[in-house]
Image: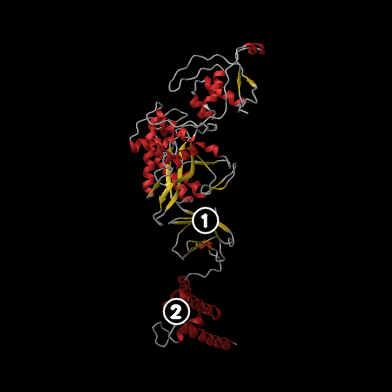
Amino acid sequence: MGNVLEKAKQEQVIALGRLGWSLRRIEAATGVRRETAGGYLRSAGIALRRPGGWGRKAPAKAATSVTTGSARSNPAIEVITGFSGSRAAADAKPANEVITGFLPEVTLPEQGGKRPSGASEPYREMIELELSRGRNAMGIWQDLVDKHGFTSSYQSVQRFVLKLRGAVWAEARVIIETKLGEEAQVDYGTGPMVRDPDTGKYRRTRLFVMTLGCSRKAVRLLVFRSSARVWAELHEKAFRRLGGSPRVVVLDNLREGVLSPDFYDPGLNPLYRDVLAHYGVTALPCKVRDPDRKGKVESGVAHAQKTPLKGKKFESLEEAQAYLDHWEEHWADKRIHGRTKRQVAAMLAEEKPHLQTLPLESFRYYQYGERTVHLDGCVEVEAAYYGAPPGWIGRKVNVQWDAIFVRLLDPKTGEHLSGKRGGHRIRDADRPRRTPPQLLQLLARAHKAGPSIGAVCDAIHARQGELGMRRIQGVLQLAKQYGSAASDDACAARRWSCASPSIASCAVIWSAARRLLSVCGRSIHSSAN
């Protein structure tokens, strides 16, 4: 039994025929063979375009039915004509029959044919190779013009490519209109293969694209790796290339920009949020699994992937970026946009004055992380320790740091100067009461307790420095236990000196002072009794 087109498909073919489309174009758009489409158009009384030319033939005589199928089944399908009533159709002359069976595939035109696609025939092998790599007709035509001196139009290559792989009917999408300088859309895509300088092997790059919503001007940048800082730096580079910043950036819910996806209250990455605030831009994440909201940048990513970058390999990231910039300047910016019917460069010149002015200084980048306050009241940042306010032990705090400052993100804490690796930096106001005082404070207390006590403590400090802090604390504890006067007399009894040859170490000084003070103390107590 022969095939019969669905009612909707019949109406689509007839509607396109009334618009003056050729059978070749109707076949590419609907997938219906030209022979079948021509039968339906003739039965509807629609004139057909002559093969290879413009204009129309004389209108064919209206038909009343089309016979489909084989000899076993020959029911006629009634076709709507200009007659009113079934009697007029029954009295009309029998219609010509159109058999809608399967026919052999249409062969490609040979070189020298009359169709414009014959200009592409000498490059058949190259075109087939590029199609096997997934490239589109536009990218193939641009390479033919740049590298092979191709002089024919893009439509000739497009027709030839359609014959090789068939046409793809795109699905309709909603168009989102934006004001001048109001919105930009950003997204990541897959970039070309580039040789990694570290490993010497080819690796896949990432393609960053920012597209202005009104002019459709796109900035495309290539990177090897992505992170929160790389994502923010790419935005800053894109703003610099555009010469201004939009007021809103529409992005996906990737981790570099959005920590907690939520349509009503999204949690942005702090670094990304601060970079956008530095340029006066507001981030507007899309709803999860809703890429149509940023369809303009999605189209920009797909255009770059399929046209200039598909099947390409580069020896360095700089070479790949230079190739992409060349294509952007000579092809992408000069193209006529399909919907607006205007050149992208001209629309950018109109939109650029409405972009926000860039700040004079670039953003000062910092690193961001979460730290736990340890038992000593400090948090660790790159092998250095910074004090938190009392009562924060065990709490998790957010920390920002760069080459100059380390900031604990809490309203009650300020900025701390970053210390060297392994060091400690604690504000005096944040020190707990049990924290040992500094060495200089201990020496000052020792000299205040008595000159001989101060001389002993200076001798300990001269021999062992900070390591003798506990022995100095022991001497002061003896003075507190037996009194400053008795302790100072005991320290002065032997007239110790730091350079005395009979004293081998500061430990001996401290032990002798403790024994002498103990004896003096007992004698003082006994005499008092």
- Using the image as rendered, state which of residue 450 and residue 155 is in the foreground: 155
Tell me the element at label 1. strand
Residue 339 vs 306, above or below: the answer is: above
Q: How many marks?
A: 2
Image coordinates for residue 520, horizontal then vertical, percent = 52, 86
Residue furthest to the front: 71
Give the residue at mark 1.
369
Query: How far from the left and from the top, in percent, is residue 472?
Result: 48, 77
Measure how far apart labels 1 and 2 are at the Cα level.
43 Å
Picture quarter containing residue 456?
bottom left
Q: Residues within 10 Å of mark 1 (few under 14, many from 20)?
A: few
Q: Is residue 424 above or below residue 488?
A: above
Decide which of 342, 86 is in the foreground and name it.
86
Q: Seen in the image, is 341 located left or right of residue 71? A: left
Q: Name the secondary structure under disc 2.
A: helix
The circle on residue 527 is none
Q: From what the image shows, is residue 200 above or below residue 214?
A: below
* Closer to us: 385 or 365: 365
Quadrant location of the N terminus in the rendered image = top right
Quadrant of the rendered image containing residue 96? top right
* Residue 460 disc label: 2
Q: Quadrant of residue 65?
A: top right
**Residue 333 at x, y = what percent?**
40, 35
Scheme of image coloration: secondary structure
Left or right: 49 in relation to 374: left
